[in-house]
Image: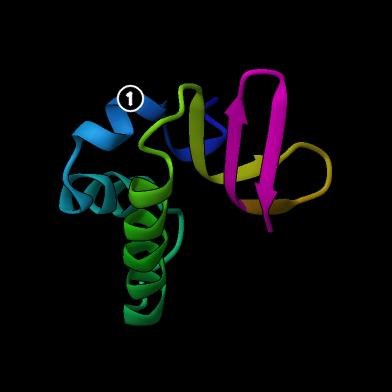
Amino acid sequence: MNRAYYSETIVNFLDQSPNEILGTLSNNSEFSDEVTQKEAWKVEIRILQNILQKHNGSIYFEYAIPRMGKRIDVLLIIKSVIFIHY
């Protein structure tokens, strides 16, 4: 089971176009994609692609938290640090 709608290394995330990432998010979404959700993803992608230029690690969008029934908007793992945007 894939717990995230989108998961990738930061290096690969930076190499992809926002439309490619948005397409993956939309394809893996379990819900109907509202315009507001797509716009929020676009903003998150743009911001993260700007600030992550000098970092290595992993990125996950819409990560499901097991047993809680909730999702983390963005999960970043850089070195031994976990960043969560909830």
Badge 1 density bin: few <14, some 14–19, many ≥20, Cα 10 Å: some
Which residue appears at 68% of the width and 41% of the height?
A: 83
- In the image, taking residue 7 as reference, residue 19 lies left or right, namely left
Helix, strand or loop for the magenta stretch, by majority: strand
* Residue 63 coordinates in the image, percent (x, y): 59, 42
**Residue designated by label 1:** 11
**Label 1 residue SS:** helix
- In the image, taking residue 4 as reference, residue 75 lies left or right, namely right
Q: Quadrant of residue 12?
A: top left
Q: Is residue 10 found inside the magenta-colored segment of the image? A: no
Looking at this view, name the residue that lies furthest to the right. Answer: 67
Span colored in magenta: 73-86
Q: Quadrant of residue 52?
A: top left
- In the image, taking residue 41 as reference, residue 76 lies left or right, namely right
Looking at this view, name the residue that lies furthest to the bottom. Answer: 36
Q: Is residue 76 found inside the magenta-colored segment of the image? A: yes
* Figure check: 83 above or below 8: below
Which residue appears at 68% of the width and 47% of the height?
A: 84
- In the image, taking residue 79 as reference, residue 14 lies left or right, namely left
* Figure check: 33 above or below 44: below
* Figure check: 36 above or below 43: below
Q: Identity of the amino acid at label 1?
A: Val
Q: Quick one: 78 or 5, which is closer to the camera?
A: 78
Q: Quadrant of residue 37?
A: bottom left
* Figure check: 36 above or below 12: below
Which residue appears at 70% of the width and 33% of the height?
A: 82
Q: Quadrant of the N terminus?
A: top right
* Residue 9 coordinates in the image, percent (x, y): 40, 23
Task: Tally the marks.
Answer: 1
Q: Quick one: 21 or 56, which is closer to the camera?
A: 56
In this picture the colour scheme is rainbow
